[in-house]
Amino acid sequence: MSLDELPTVRGVPSVTAKQMAEVDRVTIEEIAISVDALMENAAHQIARAARALVGRVDGKRIVGLVGRGNNGGDAAGALRHLAGWGAEVRAEVAAFPDDVRETTARQLISLLQIGPSVVRYANPEAPRGPSPNADLVIDGLLGYSARGAPRDPIADLIRAANSSATPILAVDIPSGLDPDTGTGTDVAIHAKATVTLALPKTGLLATGARGAVGELLLADIGIPHLAFARVGIDTRRLFVDGDLVRIRH
């Protein structure tokens, strides 16, 4: 299914970073849906969004920029799905192995089963970034909880991605963009499309953010509407037309 074939929705509510953190807490701690389950759901939706963006992925070269946190795990899991659909994948990890969050490390371990060269961890002596012949870059460097300007090695990967001609799919929010205001730092991803998870973060809908966000997609990752009700948001009919949709605003 291409981008043009995805259902379109309007009038979608948004969440601040603080609200989303509470929704995540309720989902994991009270409703007892694990981080791993949510991450796997997100990974599959990101892979679907990638396929909608570039078309058939068989033989396509797809590079994931993987941060140490949950966005990195989402991107790594998406690479595994895309490899299963025939893509040639590589993960550029912006951290050393011991610094990666446990849930993300598990996704990288699964990805490594494809081959030892698929995952490359931080190496200050070896400049990295998307190869010039990549067909797609997936930005999973920073999530909605990040604050301030990205620092190296993340900043280097962002600059390399932006300077290439390769289209970028951002996971949840383009790295370096403020989730609440939509303002970008001096170093922020400029995506062709962003697949935001569960609900758009408020900053993604800001007029000034459109150049960084690109096409805005919304993916259902299995967070119950009861969790959003705790922060006063009704999501019960959000995905009636499909679990991966385009947002018009």
Image (spheres, helix red, strand yellow):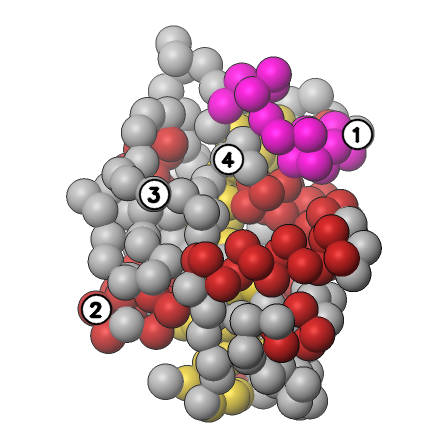
In the shown orientation, is residue 206 left or right of residue 108? left
For the residue marked with disc 4, what is the amino acid? Gly
In the shown orientation, is residue 166 left or right of residue 233? left
Secondary structure of the residue carrying tag 2 is: helix
**Region of the chain picked out in magenta, as a range:** 95-111
For the residue marked with disc 1, what is the amino acid? Gln
In the shown orientation, is residue 179 left or right of residue 238? left
User: What residue is at 40 percent from the left and 43 percent from the top?
Assistant: 146
Nearer the camera: disc 3 or disc 4: 3
Q: Residue furthest top?
A: 125
Q: Position of residue 214 (x, y in %)?
A: 36, 67
Q: Earlier in the sequence, mark 2 or mark 1?
A: 1
Mark 1 sits on what residue? 113
Mark 4 sits on what residue? 67
Q: CA distance from mark 1 to mark 3?
A: 33 Å
Nearer the camera: disc 1 or disc 3: 3
Q: Main secondary structure of the magenta part?
A: helix
Looking at the image, which is closer to me, 149 or 191?
149
